[in-house]
Image (cartoon, rainbow, N blue to C red):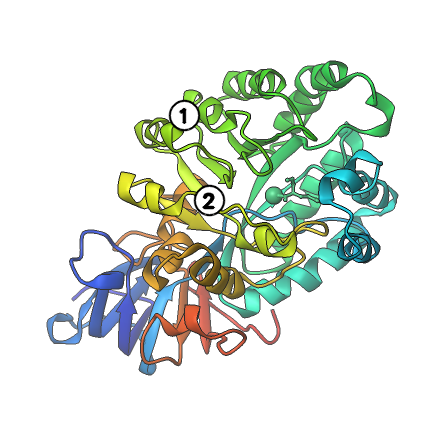
Amino acid sequence: MPSADQVIHNIHIASFDPSRPSSYGAITDAVLAVANGKILWLGAADDAPEFEGASQFDGKGQWMTPGLIDCHSHVVYGGNRAREFEARLKGESYESISRKGGGIASTVKATRLSSEADLLQSALRRVDALLAEGVTTLEVKSGYGLDLENEMKMLRVADQLSKVRQLSVRKTFLGAHALPEEFKLNADGFIDLLVDSVMPALVKENLIDAVDVFCEGIGFSPEQCRRVFEKARSFKLPVKGHVEQLSDLKGARLVAEFEGLSVDHIEYLAEDDIPHLLAASVVAVLLPGAFYSLNETRKPPVDALRSAGVPMAVATDLNPGTSPIASLLLALNQSCVLFGLTPEEALTGATRHAASALDLADSKGQLKIGFDADLALWDISHPSELCYGVNMHKPSQVWHCGKPRDNNNV
Ligand code: NIG
Ligand code: FE
């Protein structure tokens, strides 16, 4: 008799395991057993063995999904940009505000002035909103510090989030996000600083899981991003990029050349660059919250990505400027309504493909034997309901690495 810590019975499972032929990888009338924080067994109740020593949990006929994964966020920051929102509503563009020293630069100012404790406290308000919707893994980017001291401060706060909450955190270094004041006319000098001193010091402190860039006219050129990626490669760190958000600088090809994890935004991605993504197994991360908040009209080439078979993830891009949205379920709804994803594609984008975008494809994002027992239980009659309604669903129970999480008191 196999021994388990907990057996969850009387559930339907949306496993997102592609080896199961049913849509959503569904198993109806199912049982799932957990041991040592991992999934020990799952399958039809009729086939379930007896488990020794296990506590029983009655799922009351609800649906279980993997814990959700938000694979792109800037959740740690100081201040907010509500005044900039007002300016944009009066007709000023995101690019024009940014060129005048507002935008990311104003968040850099506020973040530099904030203590680690303040940043943690303000991030937790937003993180708790994500947790309440079943998020069990969150990517957190730096990029509002732009010098060693402040990038380190942000990444330490990201680390803290996983200590004060039952949550897995991936820390992404986004030093090449914007040009700080002190390097105004010297972008190459700033890249020198990033690769010669900031990245090595952060790697030494174990504060980087992946390296990101903002490849854009108001960000950094492909050549400058290449230098950042080369340094990342020397540390064996995977790369990803904010690319083709406002224009097509061929950032996606650069990420593919470095066999990166993901290309994010990609509203301006050219269709003939898609084969490069496919060949390098790069995930396309769609960020409909930024598209919505900026009232953009140019959409990412979803049909072409789908027919090519490029995996698509969906994330919040939670940040104070372009996506002040602390709801992954809303992002899923937006990806369906605005970009035309099916609910199954959207949910796969916040589970299996989101895990790939974070280099976690072997342990998270699917309900599968041996994977982490990150689980969310929902009182719904079909998984599509999670994408269809807005602010209608919260999981009735969440487990992170096999441990129940009290979402009302996280
Ligand atoms: O993902 N594109 C650059 N970075 C963020 C925006 C950050 C900000 O405006 O503060 C994004 O949209
Ligand atoms: Fe972003």
Quarter holding residue 108? top right
Residue closer to the observer: 259 or 140: 259
Write down the residue under mark 2: 300
Residue 97 against residue 138 in the figure, above or below: above
Q: In which quadrant is the C terminus drawn?
A: bottom right
Q: Position of residue 393 (x, y in %)?
A: 48, 76
Q: Mark 1 packing: few (<14 Cα in 10 Å), some, or many (20+)?
A: some
Q: Is residue 176 left or right of residue 3?
A: right
Q: Is residue 107 left or right of residue 218?
A: right
Q: Position of residue 292 (x, y in %)?
A: 59, 56
Viewed as shown, does residue 64 lie left or right of 160? left
Q: Is disc 1 in contact with disc 2, using a CB cutoff of under 8 Å? A: no
Amino acid identity at mark 1: Glu
Tell me where residue 94 sits by quadrant.
Answer: top right
User: Is 313 or 342 nearer to us in this picture?
Assistant: 342
Q: Distance from label 1 to label 2 (Cα)? A: 21 Å
Q: Which residue appears at 35% of the width and 27% of the height?
A: 280
- Give the residue pinned by disc 1: 259
Give the residue furthest to the bottom.
60
Report whether residue 254 is seen: yes
Task: Indicate the quadrant containing the N terminus: top left, top right, bottom left or bottom right.
Answer: bottom left
- Please tell me whether mark 1 sits on a helix, a strand or a loop: loop
The three-letter amino acid code for the residue at tag 2 is Pro
- Kindly tell me whether mark 2's CB lies below 8 Å from ligand 1: no
Position above or below: 182 against 206: above
Q: Nearer the viewer, residue 243 or 302?
A: 302
- The residue positioned 85% from the left and 47% from the top of the image is 114
Give coordinates of residue 385: x percent, y percent. Answer: 39, 74
Mark 1 vs mark 2: in front: 2
**Classed neighbour count for the residue bearing mark 2: other residues with Cα under 10 Å, few (<14), some (14–19), many (≥20):** many
N-term mark: 1 or 2: 1
